[in-house]
Amino acid sequence: MPFQESIAPVIATEAAAATTALTPQPLPPAADVAILRQRAKALLPDIARDAAQREIHRDLPFDFARRVANAGLLTFRIPKAYGGPGGSMRDAIRFVQELAAVDANLAQALRPNFGLIEGLLAGHDNEADRKRWFDRLLGGQIVGNAGVERGGKHGDIQATIIREADHYVVNGTKYYSTGALYADWISSIAVDEAGKETHFTVPRDRAGMTLLDDFDTIGQRLTASGTTQFTNMRVEPDELRASHLPRDRRNPVSPVFQLFLAATEAGIASNALDDAVWFARNKARPIKHSSAQRSVDDPYVQETIGQIAAQVFAAEAATLRAADSIDAAWADNLSNASLTQASIDVAQAQYFAVAAALKSAELAFDVGGASACDRQYNLDRHWRNARTVANHNPRQWKAAAVGAWLLKDQPPPTTGLF
């Protein structure tokens, strides 16, 4: 686990100026999950190798995003009937944890693809859409998001989509464009003349769309979730997409998006553990009054590593248990009762995974002395990343929703955050 010295990050660069590395052709679609597991096992060490340096240098992992997609690792949930592996939610979330454990930025940047698949699976009378998008994902293509705007009430949409002759025209500015810089397709939402929310997905090189690499946060810097600008951008009728997620009813997609964040937190905790173990073995020195000659023999270092390991173990287990609840909801034909239970379980897993990641990131510094704070080791990225993911949705609301359910049978909101 080598490290390099810090350099100042680059911000506010045009995405169009970014050059991606040459990438291999997509592998054939995987017939089962075991094949994807083998591909992940081969690829993840490569992603891990320079992840800390990429974060220091603000080197966006374009090539690795493409390699993940080309390996079919975004397709766990595509059914066998469409040429996919037919994996469970547990299978998908397990991979997300493992990817986040080597590069939490890359894991979160690819989140829209998992949500897209769940939305297609949940929809009805959308066979053409399923075939079109499943084929694209199985062919190694990547979908990014440009849905959320700044200003006004959270969730308000100001971008407009207006019918003109045989097409539509979109104007507006989005932020938190998760994965857009890595994507072949950009999915977004605008309101029409009647104020109705309208979803659309267009090719990444569409004229009138500008992607900016201006995401400037304390953590998750390489998700590149910056600004997307639409200026008289043309949208064809067949690029509109029906929304299968009514806001007044529970659905199976919202808990998946939330569980994805929990899995990312669990992965961050695991990454902090790996770094803490590496530092204790290779860099740390026992404190002067310690009876140990090596840090690995110091009982307090051992105890600290054990604490982090327990946090990781529990966070991963909680997240996978919540994935099982989503699988159970599908097995129960997405009944309201099973979806409500899944939302509750995801909220509990998310609350704990956040705490585990933040605690693990803090404890990682306790295995070494002042040198653990050297910028070259970049150990602080774990806390910064965990904190940034946690701020996507307030964890107090997760705990409060669970409490309301247990105390008075009040189900969680259907806002999309549960």
Image: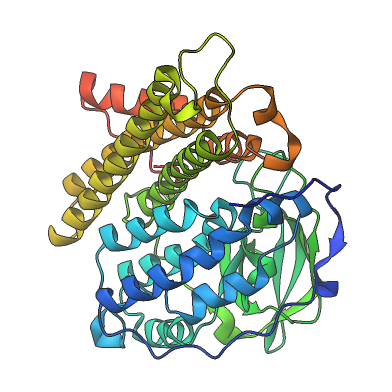
Looking at this rendering, what residue extends furthest in the front direction? 293
**192 or 230, nearer to the observer:** 230
Name which quarter of the figure residue 409 lies in: top left
Instruction: Give the side of residue 404 with respect to residue 391, left or right.
Output: left
Q: Position of residue 381 (x, y in %)?
A: 64, 40
Count of numbered circles on the image: 0
- Residue depicted at 65% across the width and 70% down the height: 182
Name which quarter of the figure residue 213 lies in: bottom right
Q: Position of residue 38 (x, y in %)?
A: 33, 74
Q: Is residue 7 above or below residue 14?
A: above
**385 or 110, nearer to the observer:** 385
Residue 398 appears anywhere in the view: no
**154 or 254, nearer to the observer:** 254
Q: Quadrant of the C terminus?
A: top left
Q: Is residue 91 above or below residue 126?
A: above
Residue 67 appears anywhere in the view: yes
Instruction: Give the side of residue 254 with respect to residue 183, left or right.
Output: left
Q: Position of residue 200 (x, y in %)?
A: 59, 73
Q: Is residue 144 above or below residue 86?
A: above
Q: Which colouring convention does the figure follow? A: rainbow
- Residue depicted at 20% across the width and 60% down the height: 330
Instruction: Give the side of residue 40 with respect to residue 410, left or right.
Output: right
**418 or 67, nearer to the observer:** 67
Q: Position of residue 273 (x, y in %)?
A: 46, 38
Looking at this rendering, what residue extends furthest in the left direction? 332
Q: Is residue 61 above or below residue 125?
A: above
Looking at this rendering, what residue extends furthest in the top direction? 289
Instruction: Give the side of residue 161 with respect to residue 125, left or right.
Output: right
